[in-house]
Amino acid sequence: MQVNEFWSLVERAREDASVEGVDWPSGSAVAEALAAGLAQLSAERIIEFDHAYQRTTRRADQWALCAAAYVIWGYISDDAFSDFKAGLVGLGRDAFEQATADADALADHPMVQAIAAGQVDRFALAAEGVQYAAARAFEQHNDDADAFWDALEAQPDEAGDQEELPGADRWSGRFGGAEDLTLIPQRLPRLLALFSERGCGGH
């Protein structure tokens, strides 16, 4: 699946999940709409979407975005960061591209600003369901929870497996040490300023 089609499906889900009077749909609402939309595709296309999703979120495997999740939520774990990356996808293509280019740009996003102001739940950006939207849609074709994972093994994304991030974007995958916390004010000054009342990471 080409990148434009991938994002077209995401944007359609965002539209379907939109609520009048609210500038942004929650991650969970986007996930519900995305699963429903994917269920209309063939099983093969659903697998292709998941491959495209994995390739897309791999671009967000960056220290700065992990640090951003830490600042917004006050903690981080491997699962939480996966939910955060899914939430970035749920924000749509423009927001995702801006965040992956400059994590501090999240300070300009209305949802992040609303979280900082206490107007919405701080986990509104989390979108665990977006990660599993393809699996849920695939199950509707097969009525078998394991069929999706079997299909992924049978149809590996060879291009995605060979894809590597540019050197500047590579990251060890570790976060949370004293050095990481020291770097946050330097790397994410505007985002940190939004959450200054509770300090870096909520402390």
Image: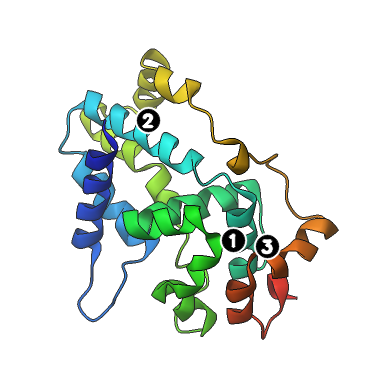
Q: Which mark is residue 149?
A: none
Q: Residue 152 occupies which quadrant of the picture? A: top left
What amino acid does circle 3 point to?
Tyr
Position of residue 83 in the picture relative to residue 78 (left or right) = left
Which tag, 1 or 2, sits closer to the chain's start?
2
Q: Looking at the rendered structure, which numbered label has been put on residue 51?
A: 2
Q: Earlier in the sequence, mark 2 or mark 3?
A: 2
Splitting the image into 4 quarters, where does residue 142 fall?
A: top left
Which residue: 46% across, 43% down?
Answer: 57
Seen in the picture, residue 203 relative to 128 is either above or below; the reply is below
What secondary structure is marked by label 2?
Answer: helix
| SS at mark 3 in the image | loop
Where is the N terminus found, in terms of image quarters?
top left
Indicate the position of residue 35 as horizontal and vertical percent values.
27, 45
Which sits in the foreground, 64 or 48? 64
Q: Position of residue 82 (x, y in %)?
A: 53, 47
| Other residues around mark 1 within 10 Å, as few (<14) / some (14–19) / many (≥20) | many
Asked if residue 157 shows in the view, the reply is no
Which residue is drawn at the image coordinates 48% and 22% (left, top)?
A: 161
Q: Residue furthest right?
A: 178
Q: Is residue 68 above or below residue 141?
A: below
- Res. 103 image quadrant: bottom right
Q: Which residue is mark 1?
A: 69
Q: Which residue is mark 3?
A: 75
Q: Is residue 57 above or below residue 189?
A: above
- Which quarter shows the C terminus? bottom right
